[in-house]
Image (spheres, rainbow, N blue to C red):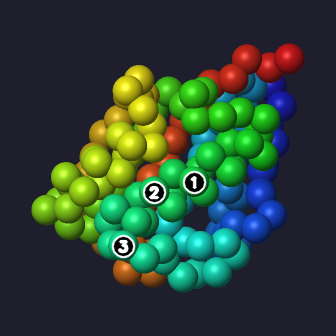
């Protein structure tokens, strides 16, 4: 099985990890924050705005792996404040549509950059 580490231009990345790793038919997307472009600036709009931005960032990472959000099989959502679950979920569902993947949401997480939300995921895309 081949393993490829994927990094996407135009997105913020810390040196400690790759944006994603492709291992066989699975794509493991690292925890992503709602940062804007290559900066460490978080999207405006609190949890709702950051949720939308992090999902856009993940979509870009998946595109760099020749995949899309429809290939996602599992998402892990981490919230700094579980009281913002409703606004995260509203933004999440608006982005993901009516057929979302499996998911867990964990609250009270201490997140980098003081972020309100962090999301990672696993996608499956059959190799050509």
Up-down: is 116 above or below 7? below
Quadrant of the rendered image containing residue 37:
bottom right
The Cα atoms of the two marked residues, 2 and 1, are separated by: 6 Å
Label 3 vs 1, first from the N-terminus: 3
- Residue of label 2: 52
Crowding at mark 2 (Cα within 10 Å: few <14, some 14-19, many 20+)? many
Quadrant of the rendered image containing residue 67:
top right
The Cα atoms of the two marked residues, 3 and 1, are separated by: 15 Å
Q: Are marks 2 and 3 in contact (CB under 8 Å)?
A: yes
Name the element at disc 3. Answer: loop
Give me the residue at 70% from left, 67% from top. Answer: 11
- Residue of label 3: 45
Of 4 and 63, the residue lying toward us:
63
Answer with left or right where residue 46 lies relative to residue 65.
left
Give me the residue at 57% from left, 54% from top. Answer: 56
Of 3 and 120, the residue lying toward us:
120
- Residue of label 1: 56
Q: Are marks 2 and 1 in contact (CB under 8 Å)?
A: yes
Q: Position of residue 98 (x, y in %)?
A: 38, 27
Q: Position of residue 10 (x, y in %)?
A: 76, 67
């Amino acid at each position: 099985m081949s393993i490829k580490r994927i990094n996407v231009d135009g997105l913020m990345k810390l040196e400690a990890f790759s944006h994603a790793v492709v291992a066989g038919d699975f794509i493991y997307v690292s925890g992503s924050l709602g940062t804007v472009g290559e900066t460490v600036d978080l999207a405006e709009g609190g949890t709702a705005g950051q949720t939308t931005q992090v999902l856009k960032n993940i979509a870009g990472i998946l595109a760099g792996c020749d995949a899309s959000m429809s290939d996602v099989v599992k998402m892990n959502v981490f919230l700094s404040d579980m009281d913002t679950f409703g606004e995260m979920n509203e933004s999440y569902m608006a982005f993901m549509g009516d057929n979302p993947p499996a998911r867990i949401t964990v609250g009270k997480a201490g997140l980098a950059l003081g972020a309100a939300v962090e999301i990672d995921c696993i996608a499956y895309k059959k190799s050509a």
